[in-house]
Image (cartoon, grey):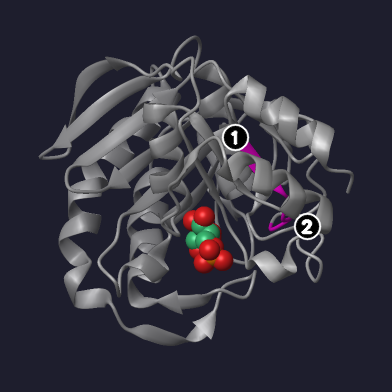
Amino acid sequence: MAADPIEAVFETVAATAPEIRAGLPGRRTTLDQQNETGDQQLQADVWADELLGDRLAAVEGIGEYASEERKEVADVGEGYAVAVDPLDGSSNLKSNNPMGTVVGIYDGSLPTGGHDLVAAGFVLYGPITTMVVAREGRPEGYVVEDGQRRSIGPVELPEEPTVFGFGGREPDWPTDFAAYVEGVRNELKLRYGGAMIADVSQVLTYGGIFGYPALQNRPSGKLRLLFEAAPIAYVVEHAGGRSSDGDRSLLSVPANTLHQRTPTFVGNESCIEDLEAAVDW
Ligand code: P6P
């Protein structure tokens, strides 16, 4: 087994990031197919998944690879399970807005919940390519240049919340959540861009709350537990914040199926407390 398979995973993701970014311009077309949770797939989704799937499967100490773009878990040897959203927010490609890659490393066979996470992180394809990696203690921030990570120090949630962003159409929000948001609007500034990673990066930088609630027509919301919600909850909780599905930490939500969805909220403790007091779903 590699000396440190977890480090090897994040080195591999960083090394692959420039190729994913460079390949985006030629892969903006929508394929005539959907992923397991019904998202229309872009060529870029499938390509990023193929790149990361091949490379992460080759990492010693990784036993399973799963992705938001694949129906089943791939058995790739012995060791940790890696769950990836290869191109989070890929619908932003058409409008040239930021996207990301999300990585969760689980010490257990998938599907398993966030309690089995041993590390998590993300790449943000913004004006520059950055990465955040959480293992023990505070997450570390990096700029990714030529596939190498250059540390820019620990990531710590600011004390004071400043921004908020919630997904879904307001008419589809549960009434108790809609009433809660009216209060938030009077306190915080709206920052919502349609890619979880970019919106969570705003919260990690400026403080506040990001979420995708339960919807009246979709009680589990939209975001995927293993590929999006649990990994980002791991990062934000290590950065001094909290996470919730409206009731409890996202790291406590049991995973029954691989592509399970969950209402998802991450941010400052005070924001999460207000949210949990306001909703009952
Ligand atoms: P909506 C992207 O498809 C994603 O999974 C998250 O990255 C993002 O937060 C959310 O869905 C956006 O959903 O309904 O606002 O387009």
Identified by mark 1, the residue type is Val
Give the magenta-colored segment's residue range. 259-265
Q: Can you see residue 165?
A: yes
Q: Is residue 119 left or right of residue 5?
A: right
- Residue pictured at 48% horizontal, 19% vertical: 160
Ligand 1 lies under 8 Å from the Cβ of mark 2? no
The residue furthest top is 137
For marks 1 and 2, the one nearer the N-term is 2
* Residue 77, image x, y percentages: 54, 41
Magenta stretch: includes residue 96? no
- Residue pictured at 17% horizontal, 43% vertical: 128
Q: In which quarter of the image is the N terminus?
A: top left
Q: How many labels does the image show?
A: 2
Q: Can you see residue 119?
A: no
- Residue pictured at 26% horizontal, 75% vertical: 27
Which residue in the structure is indicated by mark 2? 220
Which residue in the structure is indicated by mark 1? 266
- Residue pictured at 64% horizontal, 62% vertical: 72
